[in-house]
Image (spheres, helix red, strand yellow):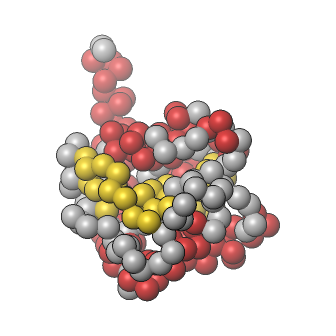
Amino acid sequence: MSQAVRKPQKRARFNEEIRFIKGWLADVKAVGAILPTSSVTARIMASVVDVSSGLPVLELGPGTGVITKAILERGVAPDQLYSIEYSKDFADHLKIEFPDVNIIQGDAFDLDTTLGAKKDQVFDCVICAVPLIYIPVEQRAGLIEDLLDRVKPGRPVIQITYAPKSPVPPGSGNFEVVHYDYVLRNVPPANLFVYRRPA
């Protein structure tokens, strides 16, 4: 790759990190990490999408859009992706970066209101980067229950965390918890967990 190509990529990554850090400083609990999710982690999270299902994908907490990009690269059509972002600054940025994606500023813990006319939509899966560790366990479990009610039976909700254990403990709801992957190439290293309804 030529230096001329590398420089814009480095600049874009730098700008993304600055934007992320500003959001983190403004609201540490809402952002949850010190740097954006790595592209490696994003691709692993997006790998749970079944493009052949024909169903849209729900993304929670897209932040600067690293995971959003990976979902689109997986083969999901932009109009088949619904990305819910709590921060107005991040949401405004995402609308510019991904004009054809359904970027919605709103609360992941009140999806009926946030999704509006699409509140009864069935999704293929949910890709979640909301920092659940700062939320009471009962609310975390309630969110997973709500998300699993919105996906096709048997399909997953995948969650990123920087803790060694699942932020939603096994036995806290009507779902199974499976450790999906541990990603060293992330700052900080990330654990991915998948939640599904029992067969």
- Image coordinates of residue 14 in percent, x first then y, are 30, 43
The residue closer to the viewer here, 16 or 150, is 150
Query: Can residue 91 be seen?
Result: no
- Image coordinates of residue 85 in percent, x first then y, are 53, 63
Q: Is residue 18 above or below residue 144?
A: above
- Residue drawn at (33%, 18%) of the image: 4
Residue 158 falls in image quadrant: bottom left
> In the displayed image of the protein, which residue is found farthest to the right?
117
Q: Is residue 118 above or below residue 15?
A: below
The residue closer to the viewer here, 70 or 104, is 70
Number of numbered discs visible in the structure rendering = 0
Query: Can residue 40 be seen?
Result: yes
- Image coordinates of residue 12 in percent, x first then y, are 37, 38
**Horizontal placement of 173 versus 153: left or right?**
left
The quadrant in which the C terminus is found is: bottom right
Residue 20 falls in image quadrant: bottom left
> In the displayed image of the protein, which residue is found farthest to the top?
2
Residue 107 falls in image quadrant: bottom right
- Residue drawn at (44%, 52%) of the image: 64
- Residue drawn at (35%, 74%) of the image: 169
- Residue drawn at (73%, 68%) of the image: 119
**Horizontal placement of 162 versus 41: left or right?**
left
- Image coordinates of residue 151 in percent, x first then y, are 63, 59
The quadrant in which the N terminus is found is: top left
